[in-house]
Amino acid sequence: QVQLVESGGGLVQAGDSLRLSCAASGPIFRLYTTGWFRQAPGKEREFVASITWSGGSTTAADSVKGRFTISRDNAKNTVYLQMNSLKPEDTAVYYCAARSVGTNEYNYWGQGTQVTVSS
């Protein structure tokens, strides 16, 4: 069973930066993509960014392009989300999720980490 553990959330001011980490354990070889999602109070969960374990291909939501960068360290089985120029509207619980090879949905999820951006 793959396990994902997020860390790095916190309270920052608008314009600040944060780096989230997602440490994966278990049968990592089964994973195809790892992504970050977020959910703000009263809103639906939304996709933020994703990266493939092999090749490192990335995608990102338009709302974070140019500000957030997703990366991975295969040796550490860890995926990062570098968030720069944070805005109050980035406030949310951020979740790490992973999709197994051969599946179309993210089937592994972390517990989430809170990011709060004050104005």
Image: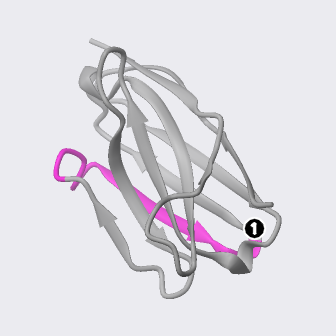
Residue placed most toward the observer, 102 or 45:
102
Quadrant where the C terminus sits is top left
Kindly identify which residue carries mark 1. 76
Please determine whether, in this image, residue 85 is positioned above or below residue 92: below
Image-quadrant location for residue 39? top left
Residue 102, percent from left and from top: 53, 81
The magenta span reads 62-75
Residue 101, percent from left and from top: 57, 79
Residue placed most toward the observer, 30 or 117:
30
Residue 99 lies in the magenta-colored region: no
Residue 80, percent from left and from top: 55, 56
Looking at the image, how many numbered discs can be counted on the residues?
1
Residue placed most toward the observer, 50 or 66:
50
Quadrant where the N terminus sits is bottom right
Q: Residue at x 40, y 36 (%)?
A: 38
Q: Residue at x 58, y 30 (%)?
A: 113
Residue placed most toward the observer, 8 or 25:
25
The answer to whether residue 72 is left or right of residue 59 is: right
The answer to whether residue 67 is left or right of residue 11 is: left
Residue sitting at the far left: 62
The answer to whether residue 72 is left or right of residue 62 is: right
Residue 107, percent from left and from top: 58, 57
Q: Amino acid at mark 1?
A: Lys
Q: Residue at x 45, y 69 (%)?
A: 51
Please determine whether, in this image, residue 102 is positioned above or below residue 119: below
Residue sitting at the far top: 119
